[in-house]
């Protein structure tokens, strides 16, 4: 008997608009009443969308001591700050605020710090380092942090990386920014969690002690306004040099997403509020402006849900929520402790938890570093330092085999990792260098290709105890990136003998547990890149092509063909990584020298139209 569902089908939800990852994505800017005094120069705003303050700033001409408060409808002038200034930082609320640093008069930096109690400004403990244009966040006049700025403008300008925390009576220096700068935007509501974003192409997050580099803005700019917290923030407007922009981006704690533009493009605006209810006031277009706009996100929206199928009545289309790999991008992440190339990795690990081992510093390295999703930690060394070995496995169970050591090339050594230490076990049958590998654990590994000294097609399989030779690859080569498991492995690129010795290869082969089969070639021949994923969905990145020194090209394998997707930020050879085609880490490599730089590949969820052919 037929089932009811087979006869009647199933229901698909009908929606008037696409699903969204956050209510913020559907937010819009709307005009409100102007400031009483037109002004610009970011950083001196505090409060919420309905209760905000602006104090100080640059007017046309000069600078001001004016202090205004917003009640959700209009601005009212109130008690001025004691020292007129612009490029000052700000923190707190309309009843408990702080106004440190700035410029007054001309280009004279001040370290004056003023505290607002709801009725009057009082000068309190000075900042340790005078500067202008730094960021500031905080909960009140007893809880604030300032960071960055310019200590002078005399050529060459001295940008600051200094961070200072305020406890209500004094300032204490904390961990410096990774990149000194002064024209960035800031967000945060305490002195233990803040963001600083903007040029030069950097964004950093503060945890109360130290700063960590995070994903960059999609649109690099200087003088953006900021609102929100360290995990949910807005970057508002700015200067793209040349050109002033109204672009607004939303930070969700891991990525930046462009949302609705400001009604009036401007730089150096005063931002305040939260990510779903923000305020942008003042700024500069071709002169100082008093313009005020409110950002409001809808209170009701349909949350995006991976795998969801729905009907969009507005566009008359069926849609599905998925993670299309061509929509992914690379962004800078925290660098490793040791710069190196030709390392091994736990390729099957998720992007939030992986291992990088060995490599060339130079000389050959024995170092092991663990990645926890935000930072790298050095741990137990290999027993034998080497580079250019093969590897496979996961965070707590992997192998590293073959390669070149200070004692000589073509080592057959095999070491296994148990999550805390390395143990030497049975060697490969054929020692070789520039070898590659795959596998799901220390008891299930595959080693293929390499040089000894000529190009090799040899393939060996490890069962946790010993290596067994299995069917060779179709084409002998070395430095041939690969990933996957023992029964299903992908190998792409490398260096081979055809058409002449040392030729970069575009060849791709799949191993099915018994034999290798040639499939579609890479779009760009290369060797020494990184590959993550499996035989049906994989990502290969970087490497050394025949036409240039190194490449930034990234290609996606869908099980049958390769497609070029977003490039690495920096062309890198002899690199490695771990993760999947959806989420991956590229760690270290070679540019003009060994590097410790790390990039993270992420693919956002997106709504795609379902087409039937």
Image: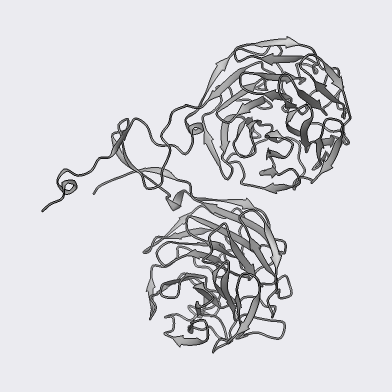
Residue at 81% of width from left, 38% of height from top? 164
Where's residue 415, x and y in %? 61, 80
The relative height of residue 241 versus residue 254 in the rendered view (above or below) is above
Where's residue 416, x and y in %? 59, 77
**Left or right of 168 in this view: 22:** left
**Left or right of 356 in this view: 114:** right
**Left or right of 406 in this view: 426:** left
Q: Residue furthest bottom?
A: 429
Q: How many marks?
A: 0
Residue at 74% of width from left, 36% of height from top? 191
Describe the colour scheme in one phrase: one colour
Where's residue 295, x and y in %? 55, 24
The relative height of residue 547 versus residue 436 in the rendered view (above or below) is above
Nearest the eye: 338 or 304: 304
Residue at 80% of width from left, 16% of height from top? 65
Nearest the eye: 288 or 422: 422
- Residue 550 makes an appearance in the image: no
**Left or right of 95 in this view: 527:** left
The relative height of residue 26 versus residue 286 in the rendered view (above or below) is below
Nearest the eye: 67 or 158: 67
Nearest the eye: 233 or 244: 233
């Amino acid at each position: 008997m037929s089932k009811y569902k087979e006869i009647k089908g199933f229901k698909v939800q009908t929606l008037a608009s696409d699903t969204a990852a956050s209510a913020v994505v559907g937010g819009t800017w709307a005009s409100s009443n102007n400031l009483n005094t037109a002004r610009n120069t970011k950083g001196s705003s505090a409060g919420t969308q309905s209760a905000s303050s602006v104090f100080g700033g640059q007017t046309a001409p000069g600078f001001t001591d004016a202090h205004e408060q917003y009640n959700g409808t209009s601005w009212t002038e109130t008690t001025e700050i004691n020292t007129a200034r612009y490029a000052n930082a700000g923190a707190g609320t309309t009843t408990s605020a702080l106004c440190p640093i700035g410029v007054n008069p001309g280009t004279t930096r001040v370290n004056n710090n003023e505290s607002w109690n709801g009725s009057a400004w009082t000068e309190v403990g000075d900042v340790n380092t005078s500067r202008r244009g730094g960021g500031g966040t905080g909960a009140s006049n007893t809880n604030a942090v300032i960071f960055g700025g310019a200590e002078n403008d005399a050529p060459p300008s001295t940008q600051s990386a200094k961070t200072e925390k305020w406890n209500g009576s004094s300032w204490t220096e904390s961990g410096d920014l990774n990149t000194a700068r002064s024209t960035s935007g800031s967000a945060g509501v305490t002195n233990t969690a803040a963001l600083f974003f903007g040029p030069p192409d950097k964004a950093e997050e503060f945890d109360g002690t130290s700063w960590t580099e995070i994903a960059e803005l999609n649109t690099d700019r200087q003088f953006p306004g900021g609102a929100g917290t360290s995990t949910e923030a807005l970057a508002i407007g700015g200067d793209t040099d040349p050109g002033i922009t109204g672009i607004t981006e939303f930070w969700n704690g891991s990525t930046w997403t462009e949302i609705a533009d400001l009604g009036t493009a401007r730089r150096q605006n005063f931002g305040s509020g939260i990510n779903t209810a923000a305020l942008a006031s003042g700024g500069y277009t071709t002169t100082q402006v008093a313009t005020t706009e409110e950002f409001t996100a809808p209170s009701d929206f349909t949350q995006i849900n991976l795998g969801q199928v729905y009907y969009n009545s507005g566009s008359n289309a069926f849609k599905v929520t998925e993670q299309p790999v061509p929509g992914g991008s690379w962004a800078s992440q925290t660098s490793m402790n040791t710069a190196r190339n030709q390392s091994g990795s736990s390729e099957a690990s998720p992007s939030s938890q992986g291992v990088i081992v060995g490599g060339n510093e130079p000389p050959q390295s024995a170092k092991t570093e663990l990645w926890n999703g935000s930072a790298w930690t050095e741990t137990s060394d290999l027993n034998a330092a080497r580079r250019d070995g093969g590897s496979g496995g996961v965070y707590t169970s992997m192998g590293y085999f073959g390669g070149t050591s200070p004692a000589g090339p073509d080592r057959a050594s095999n070491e296994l990792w148990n999550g805390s230490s390395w143990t030497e076990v049975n060697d490969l049958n054929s020692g070789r260098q520039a070898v590659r590998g795959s596998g799901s654990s220390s008891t299930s590994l595959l080693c293929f290709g390499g040089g000894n000294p000529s190009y090799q097609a040899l393939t060996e399989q490890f069962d946790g105890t010993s290596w067994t030779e299995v069917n060779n690859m179709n084409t002998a080569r070395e430095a041939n990136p690969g990933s996957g498991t023992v029964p299903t492995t992908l190998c792409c690129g490398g260096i081979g003998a055809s058409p002449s010795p040392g030729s970069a290869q575009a060849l791709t082969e799949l191993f099915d547990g018994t034999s290798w089969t040639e499939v579609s070639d890479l779009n760009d021949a290369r060797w020494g890149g990184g590959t993550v994923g499996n035989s049906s969905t994989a990502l290969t990145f970087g490497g050394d092509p025949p036409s240039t020194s190194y490449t930034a090209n990234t290609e996606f394998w869908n099980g049958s063909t390769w497609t070029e997707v977003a490039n690495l930020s920096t062309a890198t050879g002899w690199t490695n990584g771990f993760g999947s085609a959806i989420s991956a880490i590229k760690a270290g490599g070679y540019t003009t020298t060994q590097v410790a730089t790390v990039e993270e590949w992420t693919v956002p969820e997106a709504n795609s139209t379902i087409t039937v052919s």
